[in-house]
């Protein structure tokens, strides 16, 4: 993206970052300056490569099925940093330090700061400041976060705990209304990526609150005014409906506690009013006015989604509560007031995107890097004196560029209502407490596994310790602020752990375990298949399903299993079958599935695989082989990148090649492209069907997939248990967590076998 970069490389140390300000965006809003910049990040990746077996005996016992090498890879990252204006010099020093061999001659800036600090920026950085249109930048930034951060938007509900309710992004984000509350108010209708129009506004905005507030309270600082307002009681100053009518106005349907006149009591009361009460009254007056205005414009243009941004909001509960109340009241609940986790960054992101247009950042998908981002309201200038003393930085957002664009699975029944996660831990306090403790207790094991995965590294233990500290701190943040990164789920806890492992260069702690497990399972493949082929048809169908389930037991991410695998190296496929719950299973629609198999074959099955080793080789491949024999084409989808002991796409290619050498059914299916191996675009132990590799989605459409098989606890229970598809689906898993099993009404190793047919 722009010019080439050089920088110091590191050994297996933390992710080495060659921060190249190839393009940068700067925004000044009120008392904060926001900076967006792009860098290349050098990190380690574990690569697998098939051995050259020409002239060798491939069945030598000591021979692993493939080799693993660790290589350097360079990826792109976007950084967004907030500085207080008092630290503008430190901010510019930071930019200067990170201008590494780039050909950048221009920095994109927007907002008042583009004018206020123009000379200082040009002098310090020897760069020309390109002033970008504020509104264009805001909208570009807003589109970017809505498309790339699934839990970006939230509604504010004052009596909920917590008050933030995150919305799953609609696959089509347009059209929407953007109400930007800066000094004044701008109301913009956004119809497409590039088409928007200013449809109205008001001179009564954040500047009015600040200005009148300063006159009334003698308080010059915006944040102090908000603090005063949060302690005030507006009814001491405002005249309510009940003050005029003695109660509610029944004829008009107005309740007694509605404000009839802002500051109405101050005209007649012979008393002094407190600064707090006046600030609260003023905040209500301006917020209510903006809310009503936004609601009228939304209805006029038939829009039901209104996003609020600008420095007036600043994540302040009183402001969000008042605007939400106002919108609900005037629209009778038909229009929704939505706020954004990263609303403070929109202008800087947009300015950056304007500067990087020749590289077309919008053609990529981006993902939030939880390891490098501070969460919603998780830090403020008051909370972090040591960091402020150093640089004034108190808020960060990092986005990693994904190698491939991500899209919805075309087989989702209704993409706009699809929610990947089964349990919202933000809502469920009991489950939240359990899972946070569970991840804390698992931390020692993860650290141990990470160190063991790099026996040749001198600093592995030191890096693993840094990983422990970072992830532990994230878990503590989430204990106190479960809404920090959007909706808290088991998936987000797993993904955060993977991001933190990657940051300290543990790209694939289970690579050696997977290599060994795959080698052992490959040796058993022919024996397992021969035993299956010897059974009659009906017996074989049940044996295949039990094989899939037994394979799914081999999950190093589940403590109940990893304890067994570490203490008993002989524990294998047959032992796993004995662990399974006897039928009837906890969720059991096997009879319905068997009945379906007696009918015509499916056209094409899409199978999402879970674990390496026994799971994919002795569970999934025999099942795939049976479907192929029935005349069904199969798309086998595996993770693009590593997570726990899940099988990756590159590992699946080698495994398939080895199986094809032993089995004519798999061999011919691969050759004739009736069996296709694809990557999901994900590096998570869970599965989000709204963010899948575009190539996979294209293939699903082309082949007319009419059966989806999702296996594993992460993909079929923690996520997608309630996912509605427009074709037949099979969700199967073994519950390897006793707390979860109990919650679902079962025991450890209970079986979920859920076969669903969409309603006609």
Image (tube, rainbow, N blue to C red):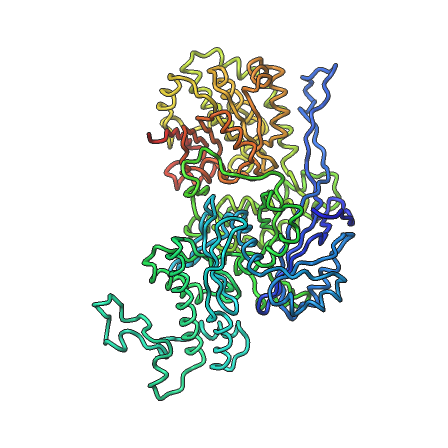
The quadrant the C terminus occupies is: top left
- Residue 688, percent across and down? 50, 40
Query: In this rendering, does residue 492 appear at all?
Result: yes
Whether 416 is drawn above or below 145: the answer is above
Which residue occupies the foreground of this view, 252 or 706?
A: 252
In this image, 524 relative to 281: left or right? right
Q: Nearer the viewer, residue 703 or 479?
A: 703
Picture mark count? 0
Q: Residue at x 75, y 39 (%)?
A: 456
Q: Is residue 479 visible?
A: no
* Residue farthest to the bottom, as pictured: 270
Image height of 412 relative to 151, above or below: above
Residue found at x 66% / y 33%: 512
x%, y% of residue 156? 42, 59
Place of residue 607 in the rendered image (x, y in percent of width and height, measured from the top left): 50, 28
**Frontmost residue, 27 versus 240:** 27
Residue 590 placement: quadrant: top left
Task: Please determine whether, in this image, residue 345 is positioned above or below residue 645.
Answer: below
Residue 70 image offset from top left, x and y in percent: 72, 36
């Amino acid at each position: 993206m722009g010019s080439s970069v050089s920088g110091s490389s590191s050994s297996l140390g933390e992710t080495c970052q060659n921060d190249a300000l190839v393009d940068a965006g700067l925004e000044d809003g009120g008392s904060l300056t926001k900076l967006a910049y792009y860098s290349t990040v050098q990190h380690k990746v574990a690569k697998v490569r098939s051995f050259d077996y020409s002239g060798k005996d491939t069945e030598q016992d000591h021979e692993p099925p493939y080799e693993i090498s660790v290589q350097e890879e360079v990826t792109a990252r976007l950084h967004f940093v907030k500085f207080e204006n008092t630290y503008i010099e430190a901010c510019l020093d930071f930019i200067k330090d990170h201008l590494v061999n780039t050909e950048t001659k221009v920095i994109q800036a927007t907002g008042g700061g583009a004018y206020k600090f123009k000379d200082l920026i040009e002098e310090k950085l020897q760069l020309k400041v390109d002033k970008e249109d504020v509104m264009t930048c805001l909208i570009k930034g807003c589109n970017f976060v809505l498309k790339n951060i699934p839990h970006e938007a939230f509604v504010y509900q004052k009596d909920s705990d917590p008050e933030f309710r995150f919305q799953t992004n609609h696959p089509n984000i347009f059209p929407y209304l953007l109400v930007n509350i800066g000094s004044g108010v701008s109301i913009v209708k956004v119809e497409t990526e590039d088409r928007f129009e200013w449809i109205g506004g008001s001179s009564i905005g954040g500047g009015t609150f600040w200005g009148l507030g300063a006159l009334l309270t003698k308080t010059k600082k915006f944040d102090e005014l908000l603090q005063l307002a949060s302690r005030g009681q507006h009814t001491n100053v405002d005249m309510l409906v009940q003050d005029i009518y003695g109660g509610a106005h029944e004829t008009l349907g107005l309740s007694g506690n509605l404000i009839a006149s802002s500051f109405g009591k101050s005209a007649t009361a012979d008393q002094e009013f407190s600064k707090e009460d006046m600030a609260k009254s003023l905040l209500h007056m301006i917020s209510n006015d903006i809310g009503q205005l936004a609601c009228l414009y939304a209805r006029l243009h038939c829009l039901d989604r209104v996003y609020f941004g600008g420095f007036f909001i600043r994540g302040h509960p009183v402001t969000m509560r008042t605007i939400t109340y106002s919108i609900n009241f005037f629209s009778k609940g038909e229009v929704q007031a939505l706020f954004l986790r990263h609303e403070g960054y929109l202008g800087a992101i947009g300015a950056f995107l304007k500067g990087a247009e020749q590289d077309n950042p919008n053609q990529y998908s981006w993902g939030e890097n939880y390891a490098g981002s501070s969460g919603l309201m998780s830090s403020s200038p008051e909370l972090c004196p040591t960091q402020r003393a150093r640089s004034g930085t108190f808020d960060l957002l990092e986005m990693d560029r994904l190698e491939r664009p991500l899209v919805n699975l075309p087989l989702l029944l209704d993409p706009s209502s699809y929610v990947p996660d089964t349990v919202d831990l933000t809502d469920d306090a009991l489950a939240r407490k359990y899972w946070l403790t569970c991840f804390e207790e698992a931390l020692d094991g993860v650290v141990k596994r990470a160190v063991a995965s790099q026996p040749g590294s001198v600093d592995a233990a030191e890096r693993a310790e840094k990983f422990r500290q970072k992830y532990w701190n994230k878990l503590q943040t989430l204990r106190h602020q479960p809404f920090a990164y959007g909706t808290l789920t088991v998936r987000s806890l797993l993904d955060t752990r993977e991001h933190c492992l990657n940051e300290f260069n543990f790209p694939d702690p289970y690579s050696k375990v997977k290599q060994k497990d795959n080698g052992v399972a490959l040796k058993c493949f022919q024996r397992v298949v021969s035993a299956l082929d010897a059974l009659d048809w009906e017996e074989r169908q049940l044996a295949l399903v039990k094989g899939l389930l037994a394979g799914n037991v081999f999950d190093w991410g589940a403590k109940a299993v990893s304890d067994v695998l570490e203490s008993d190296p002989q524990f294998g496929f047959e032992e796993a079958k004995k662990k399974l719950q006897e039928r009837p299973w906890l969720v059991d629609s096997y009879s319905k599935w068997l009945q379906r198999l007696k009918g015509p074959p499916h056209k094409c099955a899409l199978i999402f695989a879970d674990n390496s080793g026994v799971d994919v080789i002795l569970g999934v491949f025999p099942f795939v082989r049976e479907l192929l024999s029935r005349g069904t084409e199969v798309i086998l989808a595996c993770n693009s990148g590593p997570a726990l002991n899940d099988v990756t796409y590159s590992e699946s290619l080698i495994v398939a090649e080895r199986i094809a050498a032993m089995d004519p059914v798999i061999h011919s299916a691969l050759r004739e492209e009736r069996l296709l191996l694809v990557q999901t675009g994900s590096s998570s132990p869970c599965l989000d069907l709204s963010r899948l590799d575009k190539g996979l989605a294209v293939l699903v459409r082309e082949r007319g997939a009419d059966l989806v098989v999702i296996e594993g606890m992460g993909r079929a229970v923690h996520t997608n248990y309630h996912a509605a598809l427009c074709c037949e689906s099979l969700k199967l898993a073994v519950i390897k967590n006793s707390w979860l099993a109990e919650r679902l009404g079962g025991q450890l190793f209970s079986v979920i076998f859920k076969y669903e047919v969409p309603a006609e």
